[in-house]
Structure formats: structure tokens, C-alpha cells
Image (cartoon, coloured by chain):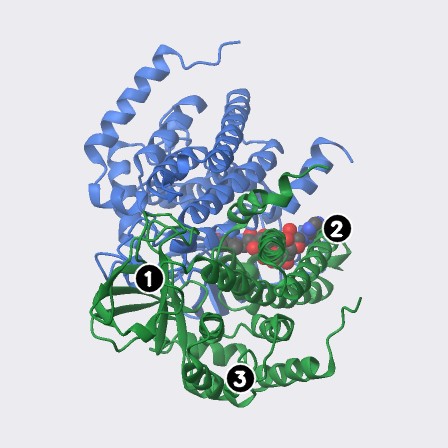
Chain colours: A green, B blue
Amino acid sequence: MDFTFNEEQQQFADALRRWVDKDYSFDTRKRIVHSPSGVSDVAWNMLAELGMTALPVPEAQGGFSGNAVDMLVVMQELGRGLVVEPYFATVWGAKFLQLAGNQHHRLEDVAKGELKLACALGEKHSRYDLADIKTIAGINGEGYRIDGTKTVVIHGGQADALIVSARSAGTQRDTNGISLFVVPTDTPGVVIRDYRTIDGQRAATVQFNHVAVPASALLSKLGGGWDMLEEAADYGVSLLCAEAVGAMEALFNATLEYVKTRKQFGLAIGSFQALQHRMADMYIHLEQARSMAMLVAARMVCDAEERRRVASAAKVRIGQAAKFIGQQAVQLHGGMGVTDELPAAHHFKRLTMIELTLGDVDHHLERFTAQRGFQQHS
Amino acid sequence: MDLTYTAADLAFRDTVRAFLDANLPSDLQKKVRNHLRLSRQDYVRWHQIVARQGWSAPAWPVEYGGTGWTPTQRHIWEEECARSGTPPILPFGVNMVAPVIMAFGNEAQKAHYLPRILNCDDWWCQGYSEPGSGSDLASLKTTAERAGDHYIVNGQKTWTTLAQHADMIFCLVRTDSTVRKQEGISFLLIDMKTPGITVRPIIMLDEDHEVNEVFFDNVKVPVQNLIGQENKGWTYAKYLLGHERTGITAVGRSKRELLFLKKIASEHYKHGKPLMQDPVFSAKIASLEIDLMALETTVLRVITRESHAPGPEASMLKVRGSEIQQQLTELMVEVLGPGALPFDTDYLEGKADHAVTGDDAAAPLAGYYFNYRKTSIYGGSNEIQKNIITQMILGL
Ligand SMILES: Cc1cc2nc3c(=O)[nH]c(=O)nc-3n(C[C@H](O)[C@H](O)[C@H](O)COP(=O)(O)OP(=O)(O)OC[C@H]3O[C@@H](n4cnc5c(N)ncnc54)[C@H](O)[C@@H]3O)c2cc1C
């Protein structure tokens, strides 16, 4: 076995980290977050220039055919640097396009950094159940017509095109009858209401009012989109797990530094045993989380059953670690921890929101126990 | 043993309920119950309504305008206020500086400040913490040098809650730096309008302006604003810390928030069923409800046992109270799931009538969760409370 990153992966990570350190300081990020658009074109172009948008795209479409392990190093750095650009949304969306196999042109644009994507999957009532869909896709001449409302579409307001799940058959929460489409955001009838999220990112409510799309917009088999949806969602989970580990690591390091330097009662607070043990627990959580982020990235290529099992396991373990590390980091920073001033507090906010994206601990525990293998006892 | 309220207590509760029904303005109630931000005017308005009834300082002796209520009655009053959703009566005047003035102040100070505190004519804030002195409060550095009939104050306070609204600040200052650190501290009352004072906002994680830095640059404070004796301030400060900690326990409010949690858990769905009916989630709520029951009973045990300042048990109440408050906010965020992400400052500040996503109840909750990480830090962090328990109760 080999748990090391290869030279190319290391280079990607280094390049990203240099860019974050130099051009994406905490102050710069704050300005971006509070700007009207909430994102930065300059930063996006830089991500494209560094090859980040091309990384996950197949070579045939001008990319580097990067796998989930390659993405692990990238997402870790973005998590560390608290980057708020619509990268996760785009890369996640690109996974759908790649699985569809009929979207070469769009993938080429993604690779060049010219097409931003977002995934419009969740609805008000659906919580984390991706099959709980009320949005309807009906036959409309040669193409389809979509009606419905998607909520908390991450970076929906910054996207050029949306990946949309809709029901073309079956009842609500049925995994049969789900279809996936790609819909340019300037299509008539698409109404986007963009807003800030509490961790400094952007999300949107997206309404589809009689949105007509051509036959070529269909990404899955008609009504047979569930497997693709699940596979892409697990890939999204692996990206988020990697981002979370980057954020946790930054938070852990900042806290370690803080308890070594902050003095009370004439001593560094890190010399109090109560806090030492807390730091040790945080370290243990961090390393378990890191292991799971590696495991889930490596297992993305497995059969569906194993992929599901590991994706849910990773999201559970990383969710638990993120909560512990996040809350303790704030606590150990004392008053400073609850202010808007420290990056640490923002890492904590980002971690909390990652937990609420694509399934929380309870959701993935339930999914883990539902896998066939879990019930076997001999 | 009889763990029920007496008939007199129940009658008292009816009186309190009738008062609240008749006098709590519905706009204030709506803000409080929906976790919206309160303005200075909101706090003052409610304080003065209660003052007109003569109930703004239930724990004070009757001679100063207190109520003469038993500890149980005071508990009922607080619980009923929390249940209805009144704005809090801020503790800085009524529960913090006033007991010190009563116990250690001179007659002139009592005559001047106490009626004004009762009626919220002055907004008080607490100037204890400094950038270098948080848990180790006695290491504070802000100096007050005697110059004739004045002190000249220099230094910086921080984390000063709502100082942006304050008329007065009570401060711990160093008047002697040649002795043991606890022995050179004095307790000073300072008018916030005095030249040389600058207040700078600190923005919290939920982007609310709740705390401040307060700078003192050669601020002239009349000697008559000294409480008690010079260099005895540490004794006075310790006297009021127990009061602060019991206040933070907030059992009444947690009970209201528990109901709110159940309400949103019955309005949010998982696989088509309310979360309230989900066995995993409802078990979490149940376990929190049971924790709250244990805490409430403990609070009642502590308050019915003592007649004056709470002892080191207050630390236990503070630890559990803050943890339960935090868990409530944690579960609220869990209920919302992805719906917790949207962040709508316009709505929270009252600039918009409705939240951008249409879910008004959800809009404040993630911010509430982040903000409430403070409860295990302020009023003496939970680690410090545990140190107090191990040293003063367990003798370790
Ligand atoms: C929202 C808010 C409002 C506040 N309002 C006021 C106010 O109005 N007036 C005022 O004067 N102050 C106020 N405070 C200040 C508050 O009392 C301090 O923040 C608190 O005492 C902790 O101090 P610190 O922030 O300096 O943390 P530190 O003392 O630096 O502590 C950092 C961490 O180290 C731990 N630690 C420190 N010493 C020990 C030890 N011996 N053993 C184990 N662990 C230890 C702490 O528990 C904490 O986790 C407020 C704080 C907050 C967050």
C-alpha cells in the first residue's frame, strides 16, 4: 500500500497553496465575500490557469483525467484557504456531464474555465433524500419541459448551466422515474434568486417555470437517472470530505499555535492538562478524518455497493471530527473564537455547512446500515 | 420532600401570567420568539414596563425597590418571562453592579444609582476583561492613578457586551501595581461620555455587533465614583461573579427553545415524515429534554437552599446551562439541514419583512448556533468553572 501523493499531485497542491497564500489572503477573501457577486472572476481565472478546472476533465476533452485522489489534494487546499469560488459546484456538475458521455463540448468548456456549473437537486421538503423530487419533466415535442423549484442550489447564481434532477415518472421519493438534465441558466423560465450562505459562499433558489429544453439536454436514460445521481453524489461527498480535512487541519494548526502562545495565569494555556487532552483528542479526530478522506477518494472507482458504503462512512466520520474540532477550536480560542476576525472561526462555519451538504451524520449512518453488507454476520 | 409548587406559588404564577399577558407588547414578543435582533430601545422599553410594575429588580431588598419575593417566586417570574418571550432584563445594572453598590457603596452612590438602575435610566456595561486578561482576570492592566479628586484611567477593556449603547461602565482597574495582583485592584464607575473613551465594535461570527473594545486615554474619573475602598475591588468583583453565573443558566429560556425545537422538528420532513417522528432524531430531543429536567431540578434545589449569594454550585449550573443552550441550537441547525445555509442579514436586522428563502423561522438559526458558542466562554469559561468545582467543592 502507498498513502503518499505522487509528484504531480504534490505539484498541484503546492501551486494552489502558493496562490492562496499570495493572492487569496483572509482579507482578500473577506472582500470577495462581501462584494455584490460574492465571488471573484480574477480568482476563477487563476484557478483555470493553474489547471484546476481541467484537472477532473478527461484528456479527450482537453483535461488531465484527474481522479478522486487528485481532487483530494486540490480540495484540501481550497478548504485550508477557505476559497469561496464556485469550484466544488462546477467540478461536481462536471461529474454528471462525464457520466452522461454526451456532453463533450461542455466538458471542454469546463476544462478551459469557461463554463461554471451548479447542481440543482434538493427541494424544500427533500432534506438529504435525492430521490425525494417533485420537480416534473414532461415530454415537450422533441424535447422536455421542466417545472419545479430547487432550493439551496450551491453557487446556482454563479453558474452558466445547471444539472437538474426531475421526475419523468413514478411517485415522490421513488428512485425509478428520475431524469437528469443540463439546463443553461439563460433558458427562458429559469428564475434564480441568489443569496449568501452563512459560511461566506453563495446559494440560490431556482425556479423552473415551463422550461423547455431540447432532447440533447437529457443526461441520463429517461426515468433511469438514479444510478448516475447516486454516483455523482458520492463523488461530491468525496470532494467535500477532502475540503473538510483541509479546513480541519488549518483549524487544528491555528489552535495548536494559539494554545502555545496565549498566556493566562503566567503560563501558556497549552500547559493546562485539560486543554492538552483536548488538543490530543482533536489530533486523533483529525487523523481519523484524514484517513477516511483518503479511503473515500481511493474507493470512488469501486463497485457501487462498496462506493456507497465508504462514501457514507467517510461523511459520518468526517462529520463527527469536524464538529468536535470546530467546536473545540472555538472554545480554546476563548472570546477570540466567536468573532468574525479569525480565519479559525470561518473554518468552523464552513465545516458546519459541509456537514449539512449532501447528508449529515445521521443520514449517512442510516445509509450505511442500509447497505446489504452491513446486515451480514457470518 | 414535596417537589411541587405550593398553592401560594401557583397563585403567584397566575398573577405573573396575567401581568405578562396584559403588558408584553406583541412586537417585542414576536422578535424574541423568532430569534430576531433586539435594539437598544427594545430592551429599555421592556425594562421600563416592568419597572412601572415594581418588578424590575426582584432580588433586591424591598428598601431599595426589590419585591420581597422568595427565591422560588423569583424563579417563577423568570420562567414565566422566558416562556412568554420577553426581552431579557440585562444583568449588568440590576444583577451585577447594583448588588455591589448596595453592599459596598456609600449612601450617595446608593441614592443616585439604584433608582436609575431600577428604571433603566442608565444603560450599564461590564468592564472586566482585557485583551491579556480573560480567564486570569486578576492580571488586568488598566490603570487608575490618583490625581487630587480624580483618577486618571488608561488602558483597554474588551468583550464589553453592548457597550455601544452604554451610559455607564463599571470597571476593574489597577490602583497599585506593587502588591500581589489581586490586592491592587479597585472598582470604578465611569460615565461613558467622559472625554478619552473610545468604543470600537467587535463583530461576532453571526455578523452581529454585540461586543466591543473600550479604550481609555487619560480619562478623568471623579474619586467619588470609587466603590468601597481603594485596592479592595477584587473582593467586590468576586462577590458578584456567582450572580452572573446563575443568570447564565437560563433554564426558562431553554424550555421555550425546546418547544421551538419541537415545533420546527414537526414542520421539517425526512422521507416524507416529520423529523419529530424519526426515532433517531426524537431520541436526541428526548435526551436533551431529560438533561434540562435534571438541570431545572438542580437549580430549584440550589435556590431553595440558599438565602443569599450562590456558592460554587453556581459553576455547575453555568456549565450545564451553557451546554444545554448550545445543544438546543445545534439540534435546530440539524433540523433545518441544508435549509440552514442561507444567511439573510437584511431580514435579521429588520430591513426586510421576510427572509430571502421564504423560511422566516429558519433564517436566524445557524447564526444563533454560531453565536451561542459564546455561552461556554463568557462569564468565566466552562474550563474555569470546572477548575472551581474541583478546587472549591471537591478539594482536589
Ligand atoms: C460574547 C461575549 C461577551 C462577553 N461580555 C463581557 C462583558 O460584558 N464584560 C467583560 O468584562 N467580559 C466579557 N466577556 C469576556 C469573557 O468573560 C472572557 O472571554 C472569558 O473570561 C474568557 O477569557 P478569554 O476570552 O481571554 O479566553 P482565555 O482566558 O484566553 O482562554 C482561552 C481558553 O483557555 C482556557 N483556559 C484558560 N485558563 C485555563 C486554566 N487555568 N485551565 C483550563 N483551561 C483554561 C479557557 O477556558 C479557554 O478555553 C465576554 C465574552 C464573550 C465571548
Chain bearing tag 3 is A
- Point out the quarter of the image occupied by ligand 1: bottom right
Q: How many neighbours does mark 1 have within 10 angstroms: few (below 14), some (14-19), or many (20 or more)?
A: many
- Residue position marked by numbered label 2 in the rendering: A277
> What residue occupies the far top of the structure in this picture?
B1
The amino acid sitting under disc 1 is Asp
Disc 3 element: loop
Q: How many neighbours does mark 3 have within 10 angstroms: few (below 14), some (14-19), or many (20 or more)?
A: many
Above/below status of A270 relative to A85: above
Classify residue A188 by image quadrant. Answer: bottom left
Chain bearing tag 1 is B
Above/below status of A231 relative to B276: below
- Residue position marked by numbered label 3 in the rendering: A54
The quadrant of the picture occupied by the N terminus of chain A is: bottom right
The residue that appears at 46% across and 76% down in the rendered structure is: A85
Classify residue A81 by image quadrant. Answer: bottom right
State the mark number for residue B38.
none
State the mark number for residue B344.
1
